[in-house]
Each structure stands twice: as C-alpha cells, then as structure tokens.
Amino acid sequence: MSKLTDKASYLKGLAAGLKLNMEKDTNQLLLEVLNMLSDIAEEMEAMSDAHDELNEYVESIDDDLADLEETLFGDDEGDGCHCGCEGDDCDCEDEDCDCGCGNDDELISYACPHCGHEIEFHASDVDFDEDYLCPACGKPVFPELEEDEDDGEDDKE
C-alpha cells in the first residue's frame, strides 16, 4: 500500500476508536469524508500502477524503435556500396544499385539545339564547364551565349 492509503486507513481506525456514532450530523460528515479519502487513495494507487505499467511499455517501444532504426538505417560508416564504390562517384552500371551512391539520379532527355537529336544523360554527369558535342551533328549541345551578342544590344542604344 502507498502512504496515502496507509494514512486513510489510519484515520478510519482513529474514527472507529473514538466510537463516533452516526447519530450526530458532524460525526456522519466526518465518517463520509474519511470513506471518500480512502476511495481517493485507492484510486490514486491504481493510477500510479497504471502509469508505471504504461511507462515500461513506452520504454519497450522505444527500445524496439531503436532496434528497427538500426536495422533499416544502420551506421553510415562502413556499410559501403555493394558494387565496391563505397558511395563515392559510383561507376557501377547496375541499374538496381540502391546503395545511394549516385547512380539513382534521374535520367534526362535533351534535344540538341542544332539538329534536334535526343540525347539522354544523368543529371549528375553533366558539367556545364565542359563542351559536349552532339553525336549526330558534332555541334555543341550546350552553346554558350557569345559576349558580342550582349555587347551588341548596348551599341544599339
């Protein structure tokens, strides 16, 4: 029993020892208050037990969740890629490679501005500082704006 239920029982025992009778209104009120205190103490003890049980259950769920996170996500260190690249600039041609090493970016289709030939590439493979030539017409796929065109507009003013 908790301290609260012990105290309620003690007070009920004191009232019984004083031989309070139910004939006086004051005594009846006092006995009913003692009964109510006893009921409150028992209810609080039951709530405390339920709280402890719920707390243990939440801790168990937390442990299970931590295990699940470890299984799903694991350590970022040492997992590496199954193709051997360890996540750095994956060169593997495996389309099913799900290691997150860079081979999962979207395939882009781009039309040559000169001949309209469709060229497909991965977005991460494009470096706009390099000159890419169209395999069909041999002209630059990403033509740069000439500085003369910008200067020409200023000359007209």
Image (cartoon, rainbow, N blue to C red):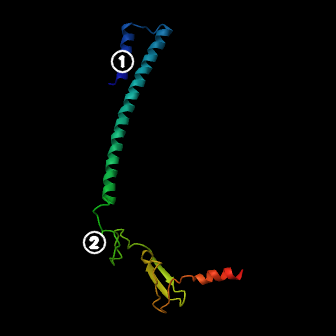
Q: Please state which of residues 109 and 143 is positioned toward the viewer in this rendering.
A: 143
Judging by the rendered image, the residue that carries numbered circle 1 is 9
Residue 134, above or below 39 = below
Q: Position of residue 119 (x, y in %)?
A: 47, 85
Residue 69, above or below 82 = above
Residue displayed at 48% across by 81% down = 109
- Three-letter amino acid code at the position of disc 1: Ser
Q: Position of residue 74 (x, y in %)?
A: 31, 59
In the rendered structure, are the residues bearing label 1 and label 2 in contact, judged by CB atoms less than 8 Å apart? no
Q: Which mark is residue 53?
A: none
Residue displayed at 32% across by 60% down = 76
Q: Please state which of residues 137 and 121 is positioned toward the viewer in this rendering.
A: 137
Residue 92, above or below 75 = below
Estimate how packed mark 2 is, as few (under 14), some (14 to 19) or many (20 or more) residues with alpha carbons within 10 Å.
few
Residue found at the far bottom of this picture: 137
Judging by the rendered image, the residue that carries numbered circle 2 is 84
Quadrant position of the C terminus in the picture: bottom right
- Three-letter amino acid code at the position of disc 2: Gly
The mark nearer the N terminus, 1 or 2, is 1
Q: SS of the residue at dot 2?
A: loop
Q: Is residue 118 left or right of residue 57?
A: right
Q: Position of residue 53 (x, y in %)?
A: 34, 38
Could you tell me how far apart the alpha carbons at marks 1 and 2 are, in whole angstroms?
Answer: 73 Å
Q: Position of residue 145 (x, y in %)?
A: 57, 82
